């Protein structure tokens, strides 16, 4: 039922998908521009280097002579390729400090980019919550500005933890794909394990952080209390939440792959922002259901808990919950 309700909430808030798209495109264009500016000096140096040109021409000559059957030429060409490769490694070593600095700057850029996109996710959560609780449609930019402080503090904590977790998972995926399995006959097994680990890892992260945004936005908890609350799994049906996230992530992956293949990537303009909205919608639905709060899934349908607490007039307009709210 949670997944069904989350899907209805997505449809009810589908207009925010286009706002997410525009916001993310602006952030992406700016980040790519800065990243390209950081990488351009090194790319130019490597492209114009004699070592790289010799390596490319050597590989081309090797393939051409191999196809023509000139076996006697391959030994000399291989030596030239090895020499060019060693020269390229030497060039990289001479620029090691600059490469490390650039890599660190790119990491900082990635964190800043995720921080800005996180502001958009927080804003989306506020908009979805307003529609679920009061049937009000909140403007995206106005909501972003009015909740900037809370969103900024939340993402200052969430983004570094997310990047660290993603880096650990990426290292594990790299090991599975390139070290644990070898040979063409293991290719499909490797791809299967890669996808499986990725889905499970994302589902684990979403399960343990799913309460953070709703606790801030709907629960009106502070940043510290919401942080403790999200990682506390007492009476939260962790396995049920995890299994729902697994299903949602698999569907998101399938939809985005199909959008890539059957629309030549154009469909990603819609499916990627919609993916974030459905995840946020599920987080909000999960929080409302667990805390036994009533909410709208569309204009005519209200989901009521089995045991409902009536809010006072003051609590309703202040946006806080009744006494059973943690």
Image (cartoon, rainbow, N blue to C red):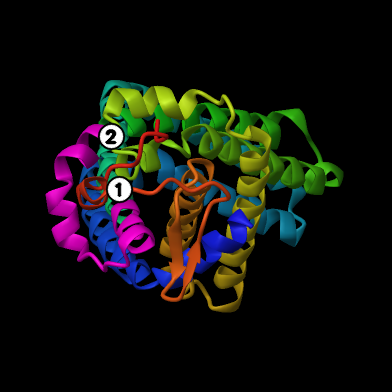
Question: Which residue, given by chain and number where applicable, does mark 1 sit on?
Answer: 122
Residue 267 versus residue 49 in the image, above or below = below
Query: In the drawing, does residue 108 fall left or right of residue 201?
Result: left
Q: Give the range drawn in magenta.
A: 125-154
Image position of 192 with respect to 3: above or below: above
Q: Which residue sits at x=54%, y=46%?
A: 307
163 versus 268 height, above or below? above
- Identify which residue is drawn at 51% across, 52% down: 282
Disc 2 marks which residue? Answer: 154
Residue 11, position as x, y percentages in the image: 47, 72
Which residue is more in the foreground, 95 or 156? Answer: 156
Quadrant location, the C terminus: top left
Examine the rendering and report whether any part of residue 214 can be seen.
yes
Give how far across and how far down residue 226 sits, in percent: 36, 29
Q: How many labels does the image show?
A: 2
Q: Is residue 152 magenta?
A: yes
CB atoms of marks 1 and 2 within 8 Å: yes
Circle 2 SS class: helix
């Amino acid at each position: 039922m949670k997944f069904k309700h989350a899907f209805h909430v997505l449809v009810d808030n589908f207009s925010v998908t286009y706002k997410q798209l525009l916001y993310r495109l602006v952030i992406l264009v700016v980040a790519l521009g800065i990243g390209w500016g950081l990488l351009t000096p090194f790319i130019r140096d490597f492209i114009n280097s004699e070592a790289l040109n010799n390596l490319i021409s050597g590989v081309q000559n090797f393939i051409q002579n191999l196809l023509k059957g000139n076996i006697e030429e391959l030994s000399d060409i291989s030596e030239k390729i090895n020499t060019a490769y060693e020269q390229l490694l030497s060039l990289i070593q001479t620029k090691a400090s600059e490469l490390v600095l650039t890599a660190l700057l790119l990491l900082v850029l990635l964190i800043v980019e995720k921080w800005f996109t996180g502001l958009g996710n927080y804003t989306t959560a506020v908009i979805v919550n307003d529609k679920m609780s009061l049937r009000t449609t909140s403007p995206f930019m106005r909501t972003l500005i009015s909740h900037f402080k809370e969103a900024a503090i939340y993402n200052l904590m969430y983004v570094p933890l997310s990047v660290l977790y993603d880096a650990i998972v990426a290292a594990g995926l790299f090991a599975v794909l390139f070290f644990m399995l070898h040979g063409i006959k293991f290719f499909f097994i490797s791809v299967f394990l890669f996808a499986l680990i990725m889905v499970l890892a994302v589902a684990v992260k979403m399960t343990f952080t799913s309460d953070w945004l709703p606790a801030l936005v709907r629960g009106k908890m502070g940043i510290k209390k919401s942080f403790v609350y999200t990682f506390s799994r007492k009476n939260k049906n962790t396995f049920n939440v995890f299994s729902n996230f697994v299903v949602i992530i698999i569907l998101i992956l399938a939809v985005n792959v199909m959008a890539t293949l059957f629309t030549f990537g154009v469909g990603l303009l819609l499916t990627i922002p919609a993916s974030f909205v459905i995840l946020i919608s599920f987080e909000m639905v999960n929080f409302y259901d667990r805390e036994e709060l009533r909410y709208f899934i569309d204009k005519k349908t209200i989901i009521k808990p089995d045991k409902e607490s009536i809010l006072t007039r003051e609590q309703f307009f202040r946006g806080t919950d009744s006494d059973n709210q943690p």
